[in-house]
Image (cartoon, grey):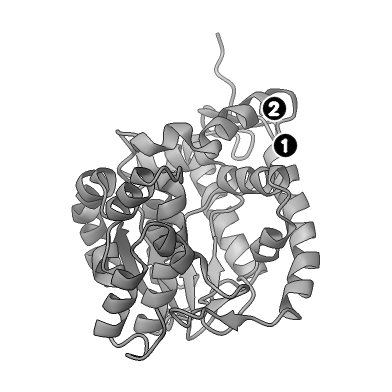
């Protein structure tokens, strides 16, 4: 059987069929297409500008590692201003998966750090909050409060990134969210009837408000499958072990639901993200006019009297331990209420 030729270059046999566009691509053209898409996203939405100091959040998965590789490559090639500073960092939440698997990617991250002159730092929940994710989960679950480990990780990781961003003087934080992640987020927000969360959704940096470091997502228009292929052929480690907490996370089932929908509508993920972006513009305009308060316990910005971190700590019976840790670090006043 005759092998079809690459739709783009017409010179090499096709290795990949991109159903959303109908293209048959050789690996070289596929890789260039992915890089062009990421670079177009950065330039079109002005995600990274001259003089920026950008943190790269490294989870240890293929997406964040590919992001670090691409940003380093683009800067070295002059496609991103060479004045831009990159600082990569990882956050160890303190449960078995993050301790023993995620941190095992440290050697490869160090390799990228040296290759592209990107400093790399590791932080832990223990040093930032005085407790680990396992500590919080144990206390919640022992009280019969069923909060998923992914929720605990997510709430504290978002706070950790703001703390780290302020400590490092970052102007933005880049995360490895891909097209699949973004499409899942749109559906989750719709299913939970959470319009307010769309105010943080979109291609441009999140609303720049006091106390929050804007997030950018340069990979958000690239399918996860294509990132995996790019990573494999560029020697970037792929995930060999799934986090055990993911199986009862709503996102896990959505991944397969979207894959089924994609068979009938190859552009379903792009359509969902486009819808989310349109709604995000409307909600972001409204969010700017909503003044933030300060958490009555820790002083961090919040839309309520108590921020989500302190609410979580309180339900786990760990609030005073957490606040005591913040006082030790001199992150809150020693007379702050508890």
281 to the left or right of 170? right
Tell whether label 2 touches label 1 (CB within 8 Å): yes
Question: Percent x, y for residue 135?
Answer: 28, 54
Residue at (51, 83) in percent of width and height = 50
Indicate which disc residue 261 carries.
2
Secondary structure state at the residue bearing disc 2: helix
Q: Quadrant of residue 331?
A: bottom left
2 to the left or right of 248? right
Question: Percent x, y for residue 93?
Answer: 30, 56
Secondary structure state at the residue bearing disc 1: helix
State the CA–CA distance, disc 1 to disc 2.
7 Å
Question: Percent x, y for residue 271?
Answer: 75, 43
Is 106 above or below relative to 269?
below
Is 230 above or below relative to 132?
above
Question: Percent x, y for residue 216?
Answer: 55, 66
Residue at (63, 73) in percent of width and height = 303
Q: Quadrant of the C terminus?
A: bottom left
Q: Quadrant of residue 110?
A: bottom left
Front-lying residue, 263 or 96 = 96
Q: Quadrant of residue 245?
A: top left
Residue farthest along the top direction in this orientation: 1
Can residue 267 be seen from the camera position used here?
Answer: yes
Can residue 120 be seen from the camera position used here?
Answer: no
Numbered-mark total: 2
1 or 2: tag closer to the N-terminus? 2
Indicate which disc residue 268 carries.
1
Indicate which disc residue 182 carries.
none
> What is the crowding at mark 2: few (fewer than 14 residues within 10 Å), some, or many (at least 20)?
few
Q: Quadrant of the N terminus?
A: top right
> What is the crowding at mark 1: few (fewer than 14 residues within 10 Å), some, or many (at least 20)?
some
């Amino acid at each position: 059987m005759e092998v079809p030729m690459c739709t783009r270059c017409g010179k090499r046999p096709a290795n990949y069929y991109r159903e959303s566009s109908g293209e048959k691509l050789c690996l070289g053209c596929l890789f260039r297409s992915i890089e062009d898409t990421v670079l177009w996203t950065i330039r079109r939405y002005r995600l990274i500008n001259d003089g920026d100091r950008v943190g790269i959040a490294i989870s240890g998965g293929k997406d964040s590692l590919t992001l670090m590789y691409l940003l380093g490559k683009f800067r070295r090639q002059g496609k991103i201003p060479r004045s831009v500073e990159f600082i990569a960092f990882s956050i160890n939440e303190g449960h078995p998966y993050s301790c023993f698997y995620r941190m095992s990617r440290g050697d490869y991250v160090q390799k990228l750090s040296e290759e592209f002159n990107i400093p790399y730092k590791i932080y832990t929940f223990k040093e930032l909050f005085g407790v680990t994710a396992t500590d919080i989960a144990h206390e919640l679950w022992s009280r019969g409060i069923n909060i998923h480990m992914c929720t605990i990780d997510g709430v504290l990781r978002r706070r950790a990134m703001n703390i780290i961003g302020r400590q490092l003087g970052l102007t933005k934080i880049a995360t490895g969210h891909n097209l699949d992640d973004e499409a899942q987020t749109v559906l989750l927000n719709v299913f939970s009837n959470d319009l307010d969360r769309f105010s943080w959704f979109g291609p441009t940096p999140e609303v720049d408000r006091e106390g929050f470091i804007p997030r950018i997502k340069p990979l958000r228009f690239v399918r996860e499958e294509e990132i995996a292929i790019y990573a494999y052929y560029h020697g970037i480690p792929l995930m060999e072990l799934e986090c055990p907490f993911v199986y009862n996370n709503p996102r896990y089932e959505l991944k397969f639901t979207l894959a089924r929908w994609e068979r009938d509508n190859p552009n379903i993920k792009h359509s969902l993200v486009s819808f989310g972006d349109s709604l995000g513009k409307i909600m972001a305009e409204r969010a700017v006019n909503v003044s933030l308060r300060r958490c009555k316990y820790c002083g961090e910005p919040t839309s309520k009297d108590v921020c989500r971190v302190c609410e979580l700590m309180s339900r786990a019976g760990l609030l005073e331990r957490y606040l005591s840790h913040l006082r030790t670090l001199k992150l809150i006043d020693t007379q702050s209420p508890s």
